[in-house]
């Protein structure tokens, strides 16, 4: 059996997953002949996507992203951002044709081992690749190297680990390493995600300990957030709760949405004085909540995306594939507090996992439960 779709899917995923820490800016002049040609092509591909053998709700989501760009508060920005959306849409189609998911598992596991090696070297102060002159970090007090793993930010690093996790949690040893990395990254959101995933993973395996598992899964993130003062990140006067409430009011004012890719530009201009006064000079360039940001950008079109997610989750539940469900939970929870969908390292891995969840059976299926 040929495995061309498997390797064609893995090449861009690996390249993007190993993107090193860097700052870059794409020079894209609007209304140039190239820009118009590319936007026309992307629009054509959005309609062609309607004929692909994927969920109707996903097809409607992609089409809405294109059509709503014309009603965006920053239409040229949204139409340009749609190029990446249509690429991701067809990448999903490609992943849905993967012949051997066992190979995917091996590639993800190799990426994970590479990251673990880098973290060990960084904790020992021996990383001569990304933190050449840094001393040994003080992990107990959250003082880490400027670059943790292959990512230039500890919160984003924890998101990356959570996105890799769904392809790794079939092995108990990986659970241990994933949990340790989340604690090392000093991220309460990542710890919460992993605890929820662990709860779902063990739920069918130890039925007599369900209550204990739930209690542990709730207490560990709460205690960690309290002891590290991370709880202020959400509920403090400068926390995300104030921004989320404010964003909700803006969403209600414009139910059609402000346009894909516009949060970073539109929200700082329209946010309330309460948000502006949180930390002078600070800009919420990301909402740290996938669903709020998507509602802000897509408006009522978010219904199509929610319908697709509901379809995937019900399929997994119907076939009692608890490892897949644990993986979906990890990605879902971390997306509520971080922004892995906006990280180049994570996007293709997320798409690949959702394409896998849309299929039945495979190396993550659990017929013995």
Image (cartoon, grey):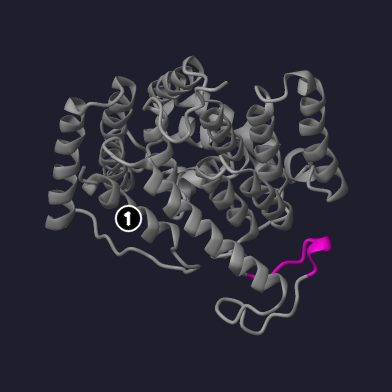
Q: Quadrant of residue 82?
A: top left
Name the quarter where the C terminus is drawn: top right
Residue 42, position as x, y percentages in the image: 19, 42
Residue 243: % across, % down? 64, 39
The mark tally for this picture is 1
| Residue range highlighted in magenta | 138-146
On screen, residue 282 versus residue 8, left or right, reads right
- Outermost residue toward the right? 227
Q: Residue at x 55, y 38 (%)?
A: 331
Name the residue rendered at 66%, 72% in the picture: 122
Asked whether residue 83 appears in the rendered view, the answer is yes
144 in the magenta segment: yes
The N terminus is located in which quarter?
top left
**Nearer to us in this view, 315 or 145:** 315
The residue where tag 1 is placed is: 12
Residue 336 in the image: state x and y as whole percent: 60, 36
User: Looking at the rendering, which quadrant does residue 184 occupy?
Assistant: bottom right
At x 76% / y 21%, what residue is drawn?
210
Q: Quadrant of residue 66?
A: top left
Outermost residue, bottom direction? 133
**Circle 1 residues within 10 Å: few <14, some 14–19, many ≥20:** few
* Closer to the camera in the image, 132 or 362: 362
Does 46 lie within the magenta span? no
Our reading of the magenta stretch's main secondary structure is: loop
SS state under label 1? helix
- List the single residue furthest toward the top: 318
Residue 285, percent from left and from top = 54, 50
Give whichever of 150, 257 is nearer the camera.
150
243 over 155 or under it: above or below = above
Please tell me whether residue 308 is drawn above or below residue 184 in the rendered image. above
Residue 268 in view, yes or no: no
């Amino acid at each position: 059996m040929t495995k061309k779709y498997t390797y064609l899917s893995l090449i861009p995923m690996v390249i993007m997953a190993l993107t090193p820490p860097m700052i870059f800016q794409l020079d894209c002049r609007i209304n140039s002949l190239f820009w118009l040609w590319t936007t026309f092509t992307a629009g054509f591909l959005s309609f062609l996507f309607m004929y692909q053998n994927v969920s109707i709700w996903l097809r409607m989501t992609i089409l809405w992203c294109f059509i709503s760009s014309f009603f965006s508060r920053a239409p040229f920005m949204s139409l340009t951002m749609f190029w990446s959306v249509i690429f991701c849409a067809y990448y999903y189609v490609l992943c849905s044709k993967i012949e051997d998911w066992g190979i995917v598992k091996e590639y993800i596991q190799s990426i994970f081992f590479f990251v673990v090696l880098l973290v060990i070297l960084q904790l020992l102060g021996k990383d001569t690749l990304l933190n050449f002159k840094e001393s040994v970090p003080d992990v107990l007090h959250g003082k880490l190297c400027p670059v943790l793993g292959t990512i230039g930010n500890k919160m984003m690093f924890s998101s990356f680990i959570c996105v890799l996790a769904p392809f790794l949690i079939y092995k108990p040893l990986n659970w241990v390493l994933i949990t340790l990395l989340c604690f090392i990254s000093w991220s309460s959101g990542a710890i919460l995600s992993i605890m929820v995933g662990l709860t779902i993973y063990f739920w069918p395996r130890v039925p007599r300990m369900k209550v204990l598992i739930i209690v542990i899964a709730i207490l560990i993130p709460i205690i960690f957030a309290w002891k590290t003062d991370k709880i202020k990140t959400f509920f403090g006067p400068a926390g995300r709760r104030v921004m989320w409430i404010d964003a909700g009011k803006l969403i209600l004012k414009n139910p059609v949405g402000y346009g894909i890719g516009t949060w970073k530009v539109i929200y700082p201009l329209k946010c309330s004085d309460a948000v502006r006064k949180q930390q002078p000079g600070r800009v919420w360039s990301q909402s740290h909540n996938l669903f709020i940001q998507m509602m802000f950008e897509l408006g009522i079109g978010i219904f199509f995306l929610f319908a697709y997610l509901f379809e995937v989750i019900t399929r997994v539940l119907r076939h009692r594939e608890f490892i897949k469900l644990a993986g979906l939970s990890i990605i879902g929870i971390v997306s509520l507090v971080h922004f892995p969908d906006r990280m180049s390292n994570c996007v293709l891995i997320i798409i690949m996992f959702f394409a896998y969840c849309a299929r039945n059976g495979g190396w993550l299926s659990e017929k013995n439960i």
